[in-house]
Image (cartoon, rainbow, N blue to C red):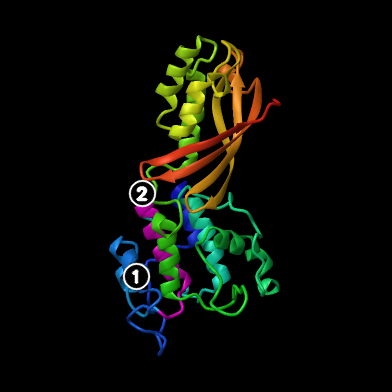
């Protein structure tokens, strides 16, 4: 299924670099792009035919070659079916749409970013079909505005090879402000934390509850949060009765506040013995996690659970 989706989205091609080269295209990246382009090459993200003519306008076929390499690197899956397409030149807004679809295909969708937090001075020039994607990649730090007065995106401007390589590197590497490099996705991390809630018994003596909290949550929360909960187990999330109990945490959205902080929103699904077979919920409860990227991995610094249930 992944192969079919990727083929339909990116229209992968067996041949690249057959478009006539521009007279002004250079064999070295621009000064501002050199460091990141070299890092992408070092990471094995740039096919050899694309390691030249960096200021040449990128084609759909060339972008698809980069996308396929990233997909295989991130997922570990090989793409064996490729189809050919004429080498149409790529614009910046077209690239934005393809980048959003690529992010979705490797399991890190950009839908959690706040849309239209930035309004470009040339907003009216962005095609309707590309508007959401343009703002998603901008808010995620994958594509930014051009270096002119004001905040301008230049949607119909050419998308060069070096620009394509840099955005692919930004998708791949955490050092360039994204989530792909991580050992665990923040969604997986949050869901693993949610699965532990049922294992933390709170209807026991305080010292026993504190030990349960320490054993189960120490690898998931900051030391400050852990101390707060072990000092006062009654404020910690967990299982307060034999039934119902918190079965899982279903993530509904992400919001990236900074390079190292993500807000994870979702619902705790509570069940009883009745819902075990059906997988349905006895009721749900909204939960928000403030998750931070640390050298040792993700850590939860704040947990807010709504009082009302549904």
Give the residue at x 43% y 41%. 298
Task: Tell me the element at label 1.
Answer: helix
Boundaries of the magenta span: 55-76
Residue identifier under label 2: 77
Residue 142 spot, x, y in % from top left: 50, 62
Q: Position of residue 96 (x, y in %)?
A: 55, 65
- On the image, numbered disc 1 is attached to which residue? 35
Q: Is residue 120 left or right of residue 86?
A: right
Residue located at (57% from left, 59% from top): 139
Of the two numbered discs 1 and 2 on the same chain, state the one appearing first in sequence: 1
Badge 2 marks a residue whose secondary structure is loop
Query: Can residue 210 be seen by looking at this rendering?
Result: yes
- Kindly indicate the quadrant of the structure image that contains residue 48: bottom left
Q: Residue at x 45, y 57 (%)?
A: 177
Q: Observer-nearest residue: 80 or 149?
A: 149
- The stretch drawn in magenta includes residue 173: no
When asked about the image quadrant of residue 297, the answer is: top left
In the image, 253 versus 299, the foreground residue is 299
Rendered view: 39 above or below 195 = below
Q: Is residue 39 above or below residue 194?
A: below
For the point 32% across and 81% down, the residue is 27
Q: Residues within 10 Å of mark 2 (few under 14, many from 20)?
A: few
């Amino acid at each position: 299924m992944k192969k079919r989706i990727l083929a339909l989205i990116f229209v992968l091609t067996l041949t690249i670099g057959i478009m006539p080269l521009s007279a002004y295209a250079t064999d070295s990246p621009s000064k501002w792009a050199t460091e990141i382009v070299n890092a992408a090459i070092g990471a094995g993200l740039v096919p050899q035919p694309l390691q030249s003519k960096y200021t040449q306008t990128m084609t759909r076929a060339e972008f698809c070659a980069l996308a396929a390499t990233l997909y295989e690197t991130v997922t570990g899956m090989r793409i064996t079916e490729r189809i050919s397409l004429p080498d149409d030149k790529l614009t910046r807004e077209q690239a934005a749409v393809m980048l959003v679809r690529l992010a979705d295909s490797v399991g890190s969708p950009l839908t959690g970013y706040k849309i239209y937090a930035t309004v470009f001075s040339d907003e009216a020039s962005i095609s309707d079909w590309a508007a959401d994607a343009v703002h998603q990649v901008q808010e995620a730090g994958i594509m930014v505005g051009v270096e002119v007065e004001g905040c301008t995106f230049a949607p119909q401007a050419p998308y060069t090879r070096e620009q394509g390589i840099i955005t692919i590197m930004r998708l791949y590497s955490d050092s360039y402000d994204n989530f792909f490099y991580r050992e665990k996705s923040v969604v997986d991390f949050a869901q693993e934390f949610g699965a532990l809630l049922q294992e933390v018994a709170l209807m026991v003596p305080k010292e026993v509850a504190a030990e349960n909290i320490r054993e189960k949550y120490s690898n998931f929360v900051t030391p400050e949060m852990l101390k707060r909960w072990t000092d006062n187990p009654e404020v910690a999330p967990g299982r307060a009765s034999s039934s119902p109990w918190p079965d899982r945490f279903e993530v509904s959205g992400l919001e990236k506040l900074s390079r190292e902080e993500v807000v994870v929103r979702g619902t705790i699904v509570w069940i009883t013995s009745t819902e075990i077979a059906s997988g349905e919920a006895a009721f749900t409860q909204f939960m928000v996690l403030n998750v931070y990227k640390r050298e040792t991995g993700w850590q939860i610094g704040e947990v807010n659970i709504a009082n009302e249930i549904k």
